[in-house]
Structures are given as structure tokens and as C-alpha cells.
Amino acid sequence: MIDPRLLRDDPDATAAALARRGVDRAALKELRDLEERRRQTIAELDRARAEQSDASKAIGRASAEERPALIEAAQQLKGRVADAERAREAAATAHEAAFARVPNLPHPDAPDGQEGDGEVLRTFGRRPAFDGEPRDHVELLEAGGALDLERAAKVSGSRFAYLKAEGALLEFALVRYAIDVAGRHGHVPVIPPVLVREEAMYGTGFLPTDEQQLFRTRDDDFYLIGTSEVPLAGMHLDEVLNPAELPLRYAGYSPCFRREAGAHGKDTRGILRVHQFEKVELFSFVHPDASDAEHERILAIEEEIFAGLEIHARIVDIPVGDLGASAARKYDIEAWLPGQQAYREVTSCSNTTDYQARRLRTRIRVDGGDNLLVHTLNGTALAVQRAMIALVEQHQRADGSVVVPPALVPYLGHEVLFG
């Protein structure tokens, strides 16, 4: 959630920034009106309570003859306080509902544009060349006995998969490899809950705008997480952190669940876009002055992970029109997939500045002043299924076997898959 004071104290700059994200000035006027109404109801309630307090004191000092009239006046003030409390609550509810749908202010350096307009910053790794037509990951994994889509569809429906034999072992190897790289950079391993309350989803900005992408339990008030960003951010809900503790850095491993609403007919072959997948997620809590540097740091860790797997990829600065609600800036790593003859996203990392922290009420203690909101950042160290696709497609050989990158051999125990 953005700071409502920005609309009052710096309206032109705020309007210009949000216009880059498609928020028009008429919507901002409504938000300003709601903010003013909220402030007015708070002031009215304070005045009513002050008069009620004065009236109560006056009754205590009054004579027997004066007291009945004062008591009657106090009763009227009690009703006024109750009315003011209801007005304040109604104004606060309307205010929060409206501001919850306003996206974060974009970073000044984030490029303008919509999906597909991202700026390619650099590439890394050698793009593979093949003598014949390369196989896609489904052909490679199914032929190697590592993937079973047909039985998964029988059990769970479309866009689910069984990873088995070397496919399952490859997942374990990739996860441990990513966690070890993250650990060398100070990220503490965490296995978080995958069922969370609405407050955690709201706090990270996935509610109310992304509800159609979430799975929710029928009989309990839980959501299945689409990323461990949610429980990692929620770890410090309603906490005031000591500045000496910062930065706090985590590497969460979890299954993730997404409806992928609106993606019918797109990327539905294989395991590129599935309802359940596993992921190692980087998450940081930092001082506001450090968030830009932390964003570049997380990106560097992601690049190190994929460069270590000898995967050719490119880094893209995502345009503001394609940012999630909470992100001020986002970088994607897109790996070359020979089976599609295209670059596809395998990781992302976002700086959400104070947007999530304001909802989560996570602050930094400041001596002699107001506490500061912390800045939060997240990044995909490794999404198992997408990393697996890039690895087997880029390192395939003509006979259908796959060369294991040297960095992964100690985790997997052999140098060739399906050979």
C-alpha cells in the first residue's frame, strides 16, 4: 500500500508516477477525498471524546442541582461518540479498500511499456547449437522415465506432473544446489508453512488484486501459497525490528500452487506452466537506504545460480505496465529454451520498497523519532520445473541423454542423465 500522505504532500509527482502504471487522476481525486474523509472522522471522534471527558469531570464537580442537566448532556455526548466511532470505522474501511487496489509507485529507472517491452540488460552463458532438431523437455524427460504427465492427468487433471526416478533426483539436486549458493550469500534456509491466513496474502499484496490466481481451502480460512514470498514476508508481521538486525535474509523452499487463470492454451505442454511446482525463494528485509543495492545483489545471486548450471539466459528490466501490484521494479532472467526456440522467464526478483511493509506493519526502531517502515525484496533463486526445462533442453545430446553441469554433479552423483 502506498503512503496516503503522498497524495496530500506531493500530489503532482505521485500522480505522474502512478500514471505510468495506468492510474488516472480521477481515481487519485477519489483517493484524496477518502483520505480527507478519514482524517475528518478521526478529528471529529477526538473532539467528541474530549468533550465527553470534560463533561464527566464537570459532573464530578457539580452541585446536586446542576448534576441532572449535566448527566443528560453527557448522555447526548455518549451517543455522539458512538456515531463518530461508526463514521470513523466506515471511512477507514472505504479508505483501506480503495488504497489496497493502488499499485506501488514505480522506480524512476524502471522502463515504461507493457508486457514484452522489457529492456534486455545483458546475456550470459553460451547459447547451445545442435546438429539436428532439438527435443523439448517433454520428449527428453518422458523418454528417460523421469516424467509422467498422463498418469498425473488421471489423478489430478491437466497441468500436473509426476517427476520420478532421475527427474525426482534432479529436483532434489537443484534445490540443494540453489540453497547452498544462497547460503554462501547469507540467506538463512527456511521451510515455511504453505497454508496462510488472509492477512498474510493481503500483507504481501496478492489480495485483493490477484485472488483469481489463488487456491483457497473450502472449510478453513486458509490460502495455499503461490510463492514462499508470502510466509517469509509474514514472519515479521507486526514487529519492530532493531536496525542492528538488518539485513534479514532468508531462502525459503516450498511447493507453490497457482490457478494460472487466463492461461488456457498457453504454455500448457509439459511442466512450464503448472498448478503445483517447487521453488527456492530469496527474501530480504533491509533499511530503506539499502533496497536498491539489495535488489542488484539478489539479481546477482540468481545469475550466479544459472551461470553455474551453464544455462544461456538474458536479464530483462521489466516495464512498469507488466509489474505486479507490489513491485516498484522487477528483473527477470529468461533462459533460452531450444524446444520453443524462445527465451522464457525462469526467475524474477522484485523490490517492493515499503509497499508490503506498510500492510504488514513491519518497522525499524528509530531512537528519538518515528519508526521507519522496512523495505522488502524477493527473488526466485530457482523454480524447479523451469530450471529443469532449461537444463535438459540446453544440455541434451543427440542420443537423448543430458550432460549434467559440473556444479550439479556433486549433488546428483553422476555426470549424465538418461545415458
Image (cartoon, rainbow, N blue to C red):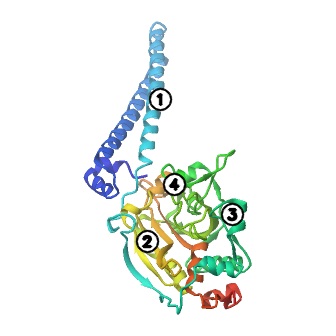
Q: Which mark is residue 288?
A: none
- What residue is at 49 percent from the left and 18 percent from the top? 60
- What residue is at 67 percent from the left and 77 percent from the top? 142
From where the camera sits, is residue 182 visible? no
Q: Which residue is mark 3?
A: 153
> Could you tell whether 72 is left or right of 178 in the image?
left
Q: Secondary structure at mark 3?
A: helix
x then y, percent, for residue 358: 46, 53
Q: CA distance from mark 1 to mark 4?
A: 29 Å
Q: Which amino acid, by three-letter code, is at mark 3?
A: Ala
- Point out the tag, 4 or 3, that comes first from the N-terminus: 3
x then y, percent, for residue 279: 60, 69
Q: Which amino acid, by three-letter code, is at mark 4?
A: Phe
Which is in the foreground here, disc 1 or disc 4? 4
From where the camera sits, is residue 244 visible? yes
x then y, percent, for residue 299: 47, 75
Mark 4 surroundings within 10 Å by alpha-carbon count, few (fewer than 14), some (14 through 19), many (20 or more): many
- Point out the tag, 2 or 4, that comes first from the N-terminus: 4
